[in-house]
Amino acid sequence: MTAESKFNDYKPAMTDLQATVEANRCLYCSDAPCIQACPTEINIPEFIRKIATKNIQGSAKTIFDANILGGSCARVCPVEVLCVGACVYNHLKSPPIQIGQLQRYATDTAVQKGWQYFKAGADTGKKVALIGAGPASLAAAHQLRRDGHACTIFESKSVLGGLNATGIAPYKMKSEIAEQEVDWILSIGGIDVKTGVEIGKDISIEELQAEYDAIFLGFGLGLDSRLQIQGENINGVFGAVDWIEQMKANRLDSKAFSKITDAVVIGGGNTALDAVRELKGLGIANVSLVYRRTEAHMSGYAHEWSSAKKEGVRGEFSLLPTAFEATESDLGTVLSGVKCTEVDAQLKPTGLEKSLKAQVALLAVGQGKQEQLIEQLGLEHQKGVLKVNKQGQCSKQGFFAGGDCANGGKEVVNASAEGKKAATAIHQWLSQGASLKAHNSLQS
Ligand code: SF4
């Protein structure tokens, strides 16, 4: 049994009847606010109307035309603050349309039936390198193939899909769904994938510039940030993103994990909320979220925190961790607790100390940026986040970017929208006869 298999879908798939009934509730608003709330601007009333008229094939096409990652977005989008949150029914004291669930119904049906909608465009003879195999690069590569450009994706890990495959809470989407989606996207053909390749190490930036006409950067963020406090290297302290990846890949030490009764997650954002719910779902009795500010200041989604509390997660607020404590066990030196100090609104210690029992502690205090790589590329950035214009063009000709490395860390749907937009800009740039190769030869 894998760790992921212990989780059920928190929003189970709709039946045909449920989808038809829900689709028929939609008012098909002419100035639909739900479309404006979607970063990929899916024509929501159109795809819902097609479900209502039993045109599921057409419905999925409407979704994929706007967002090729419509299947995973249907599961992982925070719809409560996007399309569903914008639905007019919220003002009519009626439940909003379950747009994400309907989107999942249409896209799942398309994948199950093997419906294909897209073909690669006529070969342009142009080649684009895409760095990173996450949602932004996948969306960009798919659009570039529709425009006829050859694509090569370079990924440092062995798995494709980026955080969609390694970082999504399993009650929202299991990694096998992300893998299926990657296969479906790559089935357009002509997207070469090179895994285990690190830019600047296994292939130089000069080699890339000499071989490709344009480069898309979708390499995401870096490693989990650390607190730089005592005991951070004790066995049992993990970065939350790293731990979630290990859990999803079923690489947790099950012997050690079965002995855990108390866990602490440090942070107040969405990664922290995913992590507490995952620890609880894996059967840990006492799970606490420790945040240095108040509950009202948490940056994570309120609906996720509300669900976590219902599942029994405890919130410990205005607490700043100061050290990790260790004990000796048959597994060696292991974590036993997290020492914290209470702080006031200005984050000044009040003098009150508190120690929380924990055999596992996850740091969900942000991820580092890929500043070193960005500087090697000679691109402008702000604190490690690439500077791009509205079309996704970087500070140097021929370089484009999207997703977390250019937006600082947003949703899958933002990465998909930005990847597609940058692909459109790349296509326009290449169509004018521009090329990184020509640019480099002019410079040399
Ligand atoms: Fe349908 Fe709600 Fe969108 Fe109106 S706002 S089109 S009712 S989903």
Image (cartoon, rainbow, N blue to C red):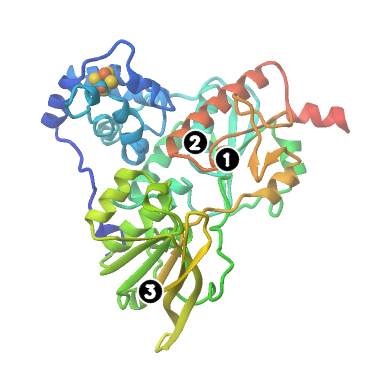
Q: CA distance from mark 1 to mark 3?
A: 36 Å
Q: What residue is disc 2 on?
A: 415
Which label sits on residue 218? Answer: 1
Image location (x, y in percent) of residue 357: 36, 75
Mark earlier in primary sequence (2, 1) = 1
Amino acid type assigned to the residue bearing label 1 in the image: Gly
The response on whether ligand 1 sits within 8 Å of label 1 is: no
Between 320 and 269, the residue placed more toward the observer is: 320
Which label sits on residue 358? Answer: 3
Q: Residue at x 37, y 24 (%)?
A: 117
Image location (x, y in percent) of residue 94: 16, 26
Q: Secondary structure at mark 2?
A: helix
Amino acid type assigned to the residue bearing label 2 in the image: Ala
Q: Residue at x 57, y 40 (%)?
A: 218
Between 15 and 172, the residue placed more toward the observer is: 172
Label 2: how many Cα within 10 Å (few below 14, some 14–19, many 20+) = many
Q: CA distance from mark 2 to mark 1?
A: 9 Å
Image location (x, y in percent) of residue 363: 47, 62
Q: CA distance from mark 2 to mark 3?
A: 35 Å
Mark earlier in primary sequence (1, 3) = 1
Q: Is residue 60 left or right of residue 8?
A: right
Indicate the quadrant containing the C terminus: top left, top right, bottom left or bottom right: top right
Tag 2–tag 3 contact (CB < 8 Å): no
Q: For residue 84, which quarter of the picture? A: top left
Q: Secondary structure at mark 3?
A: loop
Tag 2–tag 1 contact (CB < 8 Å): yes
Q: Residue at x 53, y 31 (%)?
A: 419
Please say whether residue 47 is visible from this viewpoint.
no
Amino acid type assigned to the residue bearing label 3 in the image: Ala
Q: Secondary structure at mark 1?
A: loop
Q: Is residue 161 left or right of residue 433?
A: left
